Amino acid sequence: MAAIIIGKNAELVQNIIDVIKTCYDPEIPVDIWELGLIYEINIDDENNLKVIMTLTSPSCPVAETLPPDVEQKLRDIEGIKSAKIELTFEPPWEKEMMSEVAQVELGFM
């Protein structure tokens, strides 16, 4: 499942994705973008950013720390007025949501 991207500034969207790719679940050696944990990136006309993401499971050990860490990194992007992470478990994450890169890295392909 590819993330839904809503935003007009392609350069800013790429910067957001690049930052997301620096964020890892510490138990899995693949970034959260390639894992398919990002469901939506939404940038309004004033550059307020909302990212809808999930975790590999509702009982994920980093549920309390990973989303705020990602949110802080996104706030630091030049041009972003505000950043908010919204956590969802609908639809539930499945390993099929991972990119081919992640699947190869984790030995699923």
Image: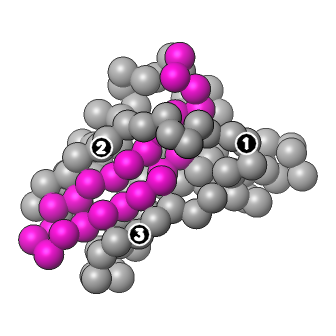
Residue named by callout 3: 5
- Residue range highlighted in magenta: 37-59
Residue named by callout 2: 85
Q: Earlier in the sequence, mark 2 or mark 1?
A: 2
What's the coloring here?
one colour
- Quadrant for residue 76, please give it: bottom left
Q: Is residue 76 left or right of residue 8?
A: left
- Quadrant for residue 91, please give it: top right
Q: What residue type is labelled 2?
A: Ile
| Magenta-colored stretch includes residue 73 | no
Q: In which quarter of the image is the N terminus?
A: bottom right
Number of numbered tags placed on the structure image: 3
Q: Which amino acid does label 1 sit on?
A: Lys
The secondary structure type at the circle numbered 3 is strand
Q: Where is residue 45 in the image (x, y as percent from the top left)?
A: 14, 75
The secondary structure type at the circle numbered 2 is strand
Residue named by callout 1: 95
The secondary structure type at the circle numbered 1 is helix
Q: In this view, does 79 lie to the left or right of 65?
A: left
